[in-house]
Amino acid sequence: MADTRVNFCGVTFKNPLAAASAEPTLNAANMKKCIDAGAGAVIAKTMTDSSDMRELTQRAKWRFLNEKHEVCRGKVPRGFSLYSRSGLALEPPDDFMKEITQTVKYADENDAVVIGSIASTNIDGWVTLGKQMEDGGVPLVELNFGCPHPKLMPGVRTGMNVGQDFEYACEITQKVTDTLDVPIIIKVTPQVTDLVLFSDMLHKAGAQAVTLTNRFIGFVPDIETGKPLIYGKAGVGGPWTKPLTLRWINEVRAALGDKLYITGTNGAYDWRDTVMFIMSGAHIVQMCSAVMCYGYDWLTKQVTGLENFMDEKGYETIDQMLGLATDACLEYAQMPHEKAAVDADLCKNCGMCLKACFSNAMQQDQKNVFVERENCVGCGGCYSVCPVRGTIKMEKV
Ligand SMILES: Cc1cc2nc3c(=O)[nH]c(=O)nc-3n(C[C@H](O)[C@H](O)[C@H](O)COP(=O)(O)O)c2cc1C
């Protein structure tokens, strides 16, 4: 059977699936459920010294939305959005650490890893919270520079407010990594212009890993009432964010290679997505929204799915898949020219390809659809819309 173990910052994980920091990891009882479900790791809900961020969790609200961005009732589609507002861990640090130490013990007994997550509003606070986590026995600490909500809370200088200020973020990272012995992971916001530059700066400031990425801020009106869903702005994400996240994983992996470990989050729905994250360059894949929708045993199914995929494809280790697609990613100028070709025997003359061609290459005479090769730029629009598989082929020229 495939070996799903991963080395992440010198710590061995039994598999690359992690429960992301959120309500499924709110306390020891919840984290135990993630461990029982077979997750390789749990990232605890972010511990904070900000009373505003703790209080926000008392008023947490979320809705699963369908493709029209209406609230789902019952069946949640594969392409859902999770529109949500929640703060950070409910208990103040001294109390939350009791949840952590209990979970660390349980994780040790069950071959799982607990990652501590922290967020402060001042530099000394980041160091103090990090030290508390380290003393509590966690082997890794994630600094949450990605939480979107402080951006909407005047005067709360944490989460994304830090992640958008690269110099300040690096100052914190430097201080924390100078003080702590355990490796530090930085969870970043996607709402910046250049995560490759930022990841490189964080690496130079002492971070051993980055978590790409936290969620976006969104706004969704209810057209029946003319009011926003759940009273106002909220974090937004879901499986549809995956290509946006993978783009950054691809670019950070390509630029920094083995210098920096990567954990991926924001759009991983199932084991297929997990494989995509790994093939883009993520060592560990964190899941939140899908677990919040389907429950803890969703994690169990994804671990099994990953094992089966690896066995079927003959991948013996996670390392054999790591960054595969990023290594194969061509520069624009290297990409080959192609032209479409139509198999007249299979073509049903439905005309879909004519509507999707903007080069005047797909043409139709009295009998057949054919390709005016000189006009064809090989975009592949016709190939995508043709309903009869095998009718249109894209040929390299
Ligand atoms: C309700 C909710 C609460 C969250 N709380 C935290 C948190 O406390 N700390 C944190 O780092 N990320 C938090 N996140 C972000 C998740 O950890 C995760 O990175 C994000 O949801 C993207 O992953 P997904 O696409 O699997 O949902 C939260 C997300 C949601 C939806």
Image (tube, rainbow, N blue to C red):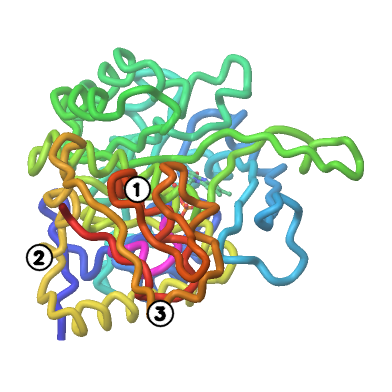
- What residue is shown with label 1? 379
- Mark nearest the camera among 3 and 2 is 3
- SS at mark 3? loop
Q: Which of 61/258 is in front?
A: 258
Which residue is at 26% across, 24% downward? 198
Residue 119 falls left or right of residue 184: right
- SS at mark 2? loop
Figure check: 325 above or below 333: below
Q: Amino acid at mark 2?
A: Gln
Residue 21 coordinates in the image, percent (x, y): 44, 50
Figure check: 242 above or below 179: below
Q: Amino acid at mark 3?
A: Leu
Q: Which residues are magenta?
A: 268-275
- SS at mark 1? loop
Label 3 crowding class (10 Å Cα cut-off): few <14, some 14-19, many 20+?
few
* Quarter assignment of residue 330: top left
Q: Amino acid at mark 1?
A: Cys
> How far is the residue under mark 3 from the one under mark 1?
21 Å
- What residue is shown with label 3? 346
Residue 247 falls left or right of residue 231: left
- What residue is shown with label 2? 320
> How far is the residue under mark 1 from the one under mark 2?
32 Å
Residue 175 falls left or right of residue 359: left
